[in-house]
Amino acid sequence: MYVAPSILSADFGSLAKEVRDVCDAGADLIHVDVMDGHFVPNLTIGPLVVEAVAKASTKSLDIHLMVENVPFFVDLFLPLKPKFISFHIEEEKHPLRLIDHIRKNGVSPAIVLNPHTPISSLEYIINEVDMVLLMSVNPGFGGQKFIQSVLPKAIQLRELIEARNAKCMIEVDGGVNGLNVSDLDAAGVDIVVAGSFVFGSNDYAQAIKALKI
């Protein structure tokens, strides 16, 4: 299991140190939640702060866009060359065009599904993306409780990936902890995003280790 600590739960007063600490503690990616206050009822960070995070990090960035006007935000973050840029299928009218644009700029494109969005929405797009992020909370805020219905959803997604022979990873974000990570692993999940479970712990290395099953 790959672990991507979400800096949404970090101490922003010491953000560079927090990023360095979780990298040293065994993080595989650094998850960055970009919220615009429109698509979700929260406002987080822009490209200047994310650029500072990239400089502090020894791991690649995993940028999750929770925004309207998705292409505008994609172009803001492409120059930072993250590993992934993910955007919500619920918002983008021309996802295939945007996926192609992201890939042509040397970044792995990823699609995000909110808890209520069915796996069937990926039927004609699954072979074009490198990752699908399943939200296991309603997006916008950290520290929420894991939505159990995402487990069968992850199993269904894994079945679709295998049926289409897609080269696509599965990531889950929201309420992930040491108690439910084994269920996610059994469902075929490759990457877990963990915010409060990691940054709210007294030992980042131990928290990350608990997720690496």
Image (cartoon, grey):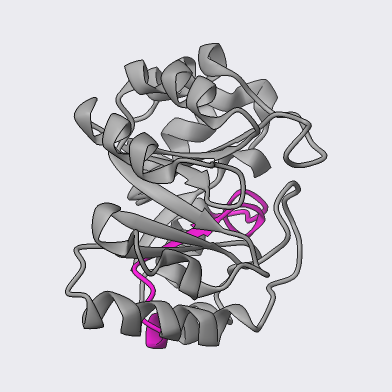
Q: Quadrant of residue 123 in the image?
A: bottom left
Where does the image place residue 198, in percent across and percent down from the top left?
A: 57, 55
Magenta residues, start to end: 185-203
Residue at (63, 56) in percent of width and height: 201
Instruction: Classify the position of the C terminus by image quarter.
Output: bottom left
Q: Is residue 168 left or right of residue 70?
A: left
Q: In this view, does 42 lie above or below 182?
A: above
In this view of the protein, which residue sits in the foreground, 163 or 18?
163
Q: Is residue 58 visible?
A: no
Residue at (61, 67) in percent of width and height: 117
Q: In this view, does 12 lie above or below 194?
A: above
Q: Is residue 34 left or right of residue 36?
A: left
Q: Is residue 197 visible?
A: yes
Q: Is residue 63 above or below residue 111?
A: above
Residue at (59, 68) in percent of width and height: 176
Where does the image place residue 129, in percent across and percent down from the top left?
A: 30, 53
In this view of the protein, which residue sits in the foreground, 55 or 114?
114
Residue at (45, 69) in percent of width and height: 211
Residue 19 colored magenta? no
In this view of the protein, which residue sits in the foreground, 28 or 102?
102
Q: Quadrant of residue 81 in the image?
A: top left
Residue furthest out toward the top? 48
Where does the image place residue 88, in percent across and percent down from the top left?
A: 55, 48
Q: Is residue 93 above or below residue 138?
A: above
Residue furthest out toward the right? 41
